[in-house]
Image: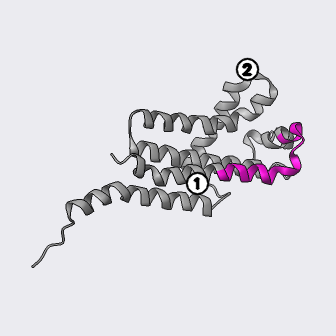
């Protein structure tokens, strides 16, 4: 009776690239289900988003409105930086996955600016839609889909970096 055993080299490659394959599948899922609600992740991101309005509330109406989406991107970016600083490959990949998912979430919100169809906390009304107000002030409301595409491009960039992380951070 023979037993199945991987060589040391194959084991090292699996240890290095196995998690990356799972993270890549998660990234594909996030992109393929654009606009759908991922309960635990989106609930957490909503808390981060709302905290961003409070945190940036000291900088005027425009930055306050932008603050929710800013915080959704800044917090995972801080985690990416921290993981890089401590040379944590898995931490970097998880943080880049979170950053990309947050960017996709912001893209959904920006894409809905003209329609203002997304439900808001507390039913604050149509004028409380952050991206409607931001893009209206900038004169870019008719370009909400282009702004959303920019956030998707940011997400895809994070996902590509996430997949390539083992090439430049192998330990």
Query: Disc 1 designates what residue?
Result: 38
Q: Which color scheme did the rendering employ for the protein?
A: one colour
Q: Position of residue 45 (x, y in %)?
A: 60, 42
Give whichever of 34, 38 is nearer the camera.
34
Q: Foreground mark, 2 or 1?
A: 2
For label 2, the residue is 58
Q: Which quadrant, please, contains the N terminus? A: bottom left
Which residue is at 40% across, 51% downward?
166
Q: Per the image, is 143 magenta?
A: yes
Residue 165 appears in view = yes
Q: Residue at x 37, y 58 (%)?
A: 17
Q: Is residue 21 above or below residue 116?
A: below
Q: Which residues are magenta?
A: 135-153
Residue 129 lies in quadrant: top right
Residue 71 percent location from the top left of the image:
64, 34
**Was residue 103 drawn as part of the magenta stretch in this picture?**
no
């Amino acid at each position: 009776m023979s037993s199945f055993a991987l060589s040391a080299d194959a084991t090292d490659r699996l240890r290095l690239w196995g998690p990356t394959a799972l993270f890549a599948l998660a990234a594909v899922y996030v992109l393929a289900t654009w606009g759908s609600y991922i309960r635990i992740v989106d609930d957490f991101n909503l808390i981060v988003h709302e905290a961003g309005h409070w945190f940036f509330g000291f900088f005027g109406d425009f930055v306050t409105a932008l603050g929710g989406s800013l915080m959704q991107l800044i917090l995972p970016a801080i985690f990416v930086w921290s993981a890089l600083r401590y040379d944590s490959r898995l931490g970097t990949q998880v943080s880049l996955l979170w950053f990309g998912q947050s960017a996709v979430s912001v893209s959904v919100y920006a894409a809905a600016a003209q329609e203002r169809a997304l439900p808001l906390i507390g039913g604050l009304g149509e004028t409380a839609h952050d991206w409607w107000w931001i893009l209206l002030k900038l004169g870019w409301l008719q370009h909400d889909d282009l702004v959303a595409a920019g956030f998707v491009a940011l997400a895809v960039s994070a996902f590509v970096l996430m997949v390539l992380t083992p090439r430049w951070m192998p330990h």
